[in-house]
Each structure stands twice: as C-alpha cells, then as structure tokens.
C-alpha cells in the first residue's frame, strides 16, 4: 500500500515513476470498435438533430460533434495535438454515412425503441474504451494523475455534453439518471490504481474496465439504479 | 478521372502529392474584404447582443465571438496555432469600432431592414473567402482532405454558430432556411477538386468559388430557395 | 505622452520594446489567493449546479468549469499551452473538496445570503489577479496589446461565462448589473499603461489594480451602481 501511495504521489508530481508503465504496449481501441463507436455516436447525434427539425447540414453538424467532441476537447484544448477528426481520414466519411442512413430510415427510426438500446450498448463499450485512450495519451504527456483522470472522463463523455449544448438541451450526463459519468470516473481511477499501483498490464486493465463499466451500465439500466440530485425539490427553488 | 481519384486518395493518406499545389502562391483574402468582413460580422453580433438587452461590455463580447469565432475554432482547437484575433493587432480595434457605431445608431438600426441586407451581402462574400483560407491553412499542415473540408466549413460558419450559442438561440445555420452551410460544403469540395484534381490555380479557384457561393446565396434569398428539415412536423415530436 | 503612444504602437506591432518589462520579476498570484479563488469559484459553480438539480458528478463538472474555465480558454484555445487544471495536480482535489462541502452543507447553503457575499469578495480579488496573470502570459508570448487585453479579460471572466452556458443560463457577465466586465477591461488597460508606458513595476501595478477593481466592485454593489442595456425595452422587441 505505501508503494501505491508513493506511486500515486510520484505521478502527481510529474516524476518519472510511470516510465515502466509507458514502456508497456498501449491499449488500442480495436479497429472495429473504434469505427463502430464513431458510427453509432454519429447516429445518436443525427437522431437528436433530426428531432430538432434541423436540415441535412445541421443534422450532420450535430452528428460530427456528438461522435468526435470528446476527442476534440481532449486534443484541441487539453493536450494541444491535432484532433483525430482531422488526422484520421475515415471518421468524416463514416459520420456522413451514418447521417445519410438516419435520413434514409427517418420514418422507421422514430418508431424504434431499438435505436436507444443499440446506443446504450455501444455507449457501454465505447465510452470506457475512449476514456482509457484519454488516460493513456495524457499519461504519455507526463500530466499528473488528477489531470489524467479529467482527460479520460472528458474523452468518454465530452461528445454527449457538447451534442446537448449545441442543440440547446440540458446535458443528460449532468442530470440524475442511470449510472454514467460516475461510472466513468470509477473505472478511470481503478485503471490507474491497477496499472500504476499494482503493475497490471494496460491491455488487461483496459478490457477489465470495459467489462466492468458495461456491466454496471447494463445493470443500472435493467434495474433502474439511478443517481440522485444533490438537492431535492423542483429546479430553481432554494 | 483516375488521376483525380488517385490524388484525392493520396491526399487523404497524407502523401506528398499536394506539394505542387502548396508551392503555388496562396489565395489571400484581400486586405479590404478581410477587415470589412470582420467589421460587418461584428456589427451583426452587436445587433444580436443589443436585442438581448446586454450592456456595452456584453454586446462587445458577442461582436467579438461573432466576427472571430470561426478562426478561433480553426486555429485554437483544430490547427493548434495562435488565432488571428490575438496575432493581428487591428481586429479588436475594428470590432470595438463596429460595436460603438451600433450603440451610437441603435435607434436607427432597429428600424432598418437595410442592415440585414448588408449582412447578407457580406456573408455571401466573406463566408466563402474565409472558408478557402481555412482550406489552404489545413492543406499546408498536411491534413487529409475530409479534415480539410471540415476546417474550411468551420472557418466560414463557426462564428455565426458560436454567436447564437452564446446568446442562447438555436444556431440559425443548423435550421432549415436559405442555402448556407450546404453551399459552403459544396464550394469547399469544388475548390479541392479544381485545385488538386484539375490543377486550377488557387487564386482563380478561390475567386470562382466566391462568385459561385455569392450567386447561389443571392438567388436563394431572392427566390426563397430553402432547405428542408430532415424530419417534418413540429420539433420534439417523433 | 509620445513615448507612451510610441510604446503602445511598438507593442501592437510585435516589436521588442517590451523586453525591459519582461525582464522584471513576474507578478505571481499568491499561493493562498490562487487556491482560495479556485476553491470559492468551485463553490459558486457547485451551488449553481445543485440548484439545477444535477447529480453529484454533474455538480462536479459545473464546479470544474466555473473554477478553471478562464484559464482553459486562455491556455487551451488562445496561448496553445497545457492548461493549469491539467499541469497543477492540486486544483482538481481542491475542486472536489469544494463540491463535497457544498453537498454536505446543502441545506444551510440554500438559506445563506452569506455565500453570495463571500463569492462577491473573492471575485473582487480573484478576477483581477487572474486577469493580470493572463496579461503577463500573453505579453511573454509577444502578442500585440489588443490581444493581450483580450486574454486578460477572458482569464478573469471566462469561467463564469462558461459556467452559465453549461447550465443553460444567460451569462450574467453579459447582462446589465453591477460593474464587472467593464471594470476588468479598465484595469487591464490601466495595467498596460502603467507598466509599459510609465515603467511602473509589474508587482506594484498588479496590486494597485487588484485594490482598484475590488474598490470599484464593492462600491458598485454597495451603492447599486449598475450598467445599462445598450437598447432599452423588453428583450426581443426592436
């Protein structure tokens, strides 16, 4: 345990203690999951934009921000790198395809509860996967652990928050509901404890965290485990 | 045609095929158009802020974001460069002047349909001009073509979207209306096809695209050509 | 006076005239004020989030953005540096502590007018202190003076504006009220005139500006000095 505290404090102070962890192979979001997540988050964004009665270009903008917003904040604002929506030439074609399919099947989509379920499943896998990518990228830059967790969580949930802000909705991620942001925070902390504190390999820890988050998320939806508002009563009153 | 596809794919994959194009002289937004566009976008932002009953400092903030928001996203978030609102010492004085003039003539401005027309004309010229600046800057950084188009479109329409979000309005650019974002996407694609695919000089292609966008925009306003919502019916229903 | 104009113009044009000023010791926000300001802005953000009936994670996100949003725009978008919320390992623990305390004392906080007063006092000291940090950092990067003022003002008031936008409120800073943004603009201009024009040391000028802003702010609250909307009448009418 003192080793764990030592290593946590070491990392908080920009020391080179995390060198060993960085030399391990990085966890990579598997090719298929990467594009599938971008595709389905674009679908979710396009559906939101469509229900706001935007035109095709407007729906496309919402799809773009929903699917790439997390990595946009991560790289463009936090880590000062070119965001993947620019450097990866396939994200935008995937997002355009998703938007066109939503437009094509607009009549059916509005009647399908299935879409919500599919988005829930992909959220359950994609959000932790991208959160861990954010953790790894910021560990590499030598950022102290609290900042590493912030980058990870933002990478996972930032797109959804930006999507809601763009269309003028209260961000769902901030409101009481099934376990989501708190679950992402939990698995980010646990990933760091496992890899930096207990020397678990990043690959194993990553998959473990994805399974854990997915399980929590599905149980929370199935049994309607919900977070509570910090303050009860109708909004705006004191 | 195979050459075109070849060069499109080449550019998508970060190859050096665009070297020849980069060695050409860059299209520069003419001095006068640059400041005129910033001035008039600041005027449009100041009018929006004034109608929200903000105070002078608040109106100035809206004017700033409306006139420089596109280049702020382009450089600050996408291309990782110092945005021109900081590096160019004349933008802020121009924006302050615009805001003060709006304040001075506030009684007249509220009764003038003329302002809308002037903003429409400057949008018709300024939006494509700045979109092409965005295309060129991202081509120079070796970004694949889909990302280049994203930067160009954002450079053109980002300021208007940020202005609307800041004051709590639904972004006009996302909603059905006269042809705007889709026109910008079109001229961005066409600019790349002409310069990279057919070897047209950037200078000529830029002016061609400005004339094309201006024509489309004016015709769309004159004959009320409007985009349609992807999904019909009142917002919020399914 | 011609010297002043000379030096102002020199700085606007990226000349090396500000070398002498840069060689002086920098004004540093005192250790205690730095963390106290972050703590109390986090408290103010957490209270806003709590009244919106967000859950704990949601309240924490609002607290984070309220307390670090100004420096996030400054470094992440304007100056292209890693923002301090990532590089300083203590900000996030301070913000989490603030959020937990707000949650713990939620019943009392809702009944205390004291909280507003404490936030007003810390705003009165913290806003000018961070504005001057923004001025110094952008002077160091050789940015022309108008951009330097923009970075300073944003550093001071950006967090409050982002907090309000995140929760869907009209940004208080933009609306008529007690003197705030215009006061920050004033002390930023005065700081530059004193240090660049009259050779006053940065340390002295910084504390002078903090005292000046605090005095203006407290007098404005005490005697209800308020800014006026540029255009009178109810919002949305012309």
Image (tube, coloured by chain):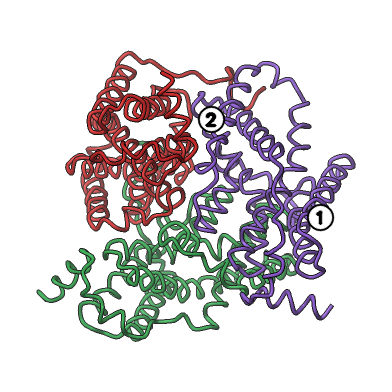
Chain colours: A purple, B red, C green
**Place of residue B127 in the rendered image (x, y in percent of width and height, measured from the top left):** 32, 34
Tell me: residue B18, above or below residue C22: above
Q: Which residue is mark 2?
A: A60
Front position in the image: A211 or A171: A211
In the image, taking residue A67 as reference, residue C195 lies left or right, namely left
Front position in the image: C55 or A213: A213
Residue B111 seen from this side = no
Q: Which residue is mark 1?
A: A204
Q: Give me the residue at 53% from left, 83% from top.
A: C31
**Place of residue C192 in the rendered image (x, y in percent of width and height, measured from the top left):** 27, 73
Looking at this rendering, what residue extends furthest in the left direction? C2
In the image, taking residue A18 as reference, residue B223 lies left or right, namely left
**Place of residue B112 in the rendered image (x, y in percent of width and height, measured from the top left):** 24, 32
Tell me: residue A117, above or below residue C187: above
Image quarter of the C terminus of chain A: bottom right
Front position in the image: A159 or B20: B20
**Place of residue A94 in the rendered image (x, y in percent of width and height, measured from the top left):** 59, 30
Looking at this rendering, what residue extends furthest in the right direction? A223
Q: Chain of mark 1?
A: A
Image quarter of the N terminus of chain A: bottom right
In the image, taking residue A80 as reference, residue B178 lies left or right, namely left
Does the CB distance between marks 2 and 1 fall below 8 Å? no
Q: Chain of mark 2?
A: A
Q: Secondary structure at mark 1?
A: helix
Q: Earlier in the sequence, mark 2 or mark 1?
A: 2
Q: Give me the residue at 56% from left, 66% from top.
A: C67
């Amino acid at each position: 345990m003192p080793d764990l505290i030592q290593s946590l404090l070491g990392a908080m102070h920009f020391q080179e203690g995390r060198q060993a962890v960085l030399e391990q192979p990085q966890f990579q979001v598997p090719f298929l999951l990467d594009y599938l997540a971008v595709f389905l988050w674009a679908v979710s964004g396009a559906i939101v934009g469509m229900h706001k009665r935007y035109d095709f270009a407007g729906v496309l903008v919402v799809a773009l921000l929903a699917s790439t917003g997390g990595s946009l904040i991560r790289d463009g604002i936090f880590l000062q790198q070119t965001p993947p929506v620019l450097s990866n030439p396939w994200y935008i074609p995937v997002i355009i395809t998703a938007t066109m399919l939503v437009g094509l099947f607009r009549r059916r989509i509005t009647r399908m509860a299935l879409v919500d379920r599919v988005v829930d499943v992909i959220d359950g896998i994609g959000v932790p996967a991208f959160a861990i990518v954010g953790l790894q990228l910021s560990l590499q830059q030598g950022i102290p652990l609290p900042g590493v967790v912030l980058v990870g969580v933002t990478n996972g949930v930032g797109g959804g928050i930006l999507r809601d802000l763009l269309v003028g909705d209260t961000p769902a991620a901030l409101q009481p509901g099934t376990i989501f942001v708190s679950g992402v925070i939990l698995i980010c902390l646990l990933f760091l404890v496992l890899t930096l504190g207990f020397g678990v390999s990043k690959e194993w820890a990553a998959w473990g965290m994805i399974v854990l988050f997915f399980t929590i998320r599905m149980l929370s939806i199935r049994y309607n485990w919900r977070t509570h508002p910090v303050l009860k009563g109708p909004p705006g009153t004191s």
